[in-house]
Image: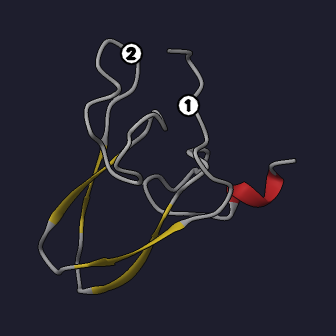
Amino acid sequence: MADEPFSPQSFPYAVEVEAGKHYWWCACGQSDKQPFCDGSHAGSCFSPVEYVAEQSGLVYFCGCKLSEGKPLCDGSHSQLS
């Protein structure tokens, strides 16, 4: 696995989250359970990022893996060619 994350898609994942629940966002881009971690990062320099939902509702998790606001989308995907 490279030092740069794989970008599984060039737009965010819209996910309904539940207040107080913990979510583990995939930082490497290799997980088959996007946008969440399935352990595919094992042996790499990547680690999943914990997200605790403050309230229930729709959240946009980064799909390109380049967001400065990881794990949430900050629009970085608009810079992809």
Q: Earlier in the sequence, mark 2 or mark 1?
A: 1
The amino acid type, in three-letter code, at marker 1 is Pro
Task: Choose top left, top right, bottom left or bottom right for residue 47.
Answer: top left
**Residue 39: percent from left, percent from top:** 26, 31
Say if 68 sits above or below 40 in the image. Answer: below
Residue at image position (87%, 47%) is 81
**Residue 79: percent from left, percent from top:** 81, 53
The amino acid type, in three-letter code, at marker 2 is Ser
Q: Residue furthest left?
A: 20
Disc 2/disc 1 C-alpha distance (Å): 10 Å
The residue wearing badge 1 is 5
**Residue 53: percent from left, percent from top:** 24, 73
Say if 57 sits above or below 69 in the image. Answer: below
Say if 69 sits above or below 30 in the image. Answer: below
Say if 31 sits above or below 46 in the image. Answer: below
Give the side of residue 43 with respect to residue 10, left or right: left
Mark 2–mark 1 contact, CB under 8 Å? no
Q: Residue furthest right?
A: 81
Residue at image position (47%, 52%) is 70
Question: Helix, strand or loop at disc 1?
Answer: loop
Give the crowd class for mark 1: few <14, some 14-19, many >=20 residues within 10 Å.
some
Residue at image position (49%, 38%) is 29
Give the side of residue 36 with respect to residue 81, left or right: left
Give the crowd class for mark 2: few <14, some 14-19, many >=20 residues within 10 Å.
few
Question: Helix, strand or loop at disc 2?
Answer: loop
The label shown at residue 71 is none
The residue wearing badge 2 is 44
Q: What colour scheme was applied to this rendering of the protein?
A: secondary structure
**Residue 14: percent from left, percent from top:** 47, 74
Count numbered badges in the picture: 2
Q: Residue furthest front?
A: 32
Residue at image position (60%, 25%) is 4
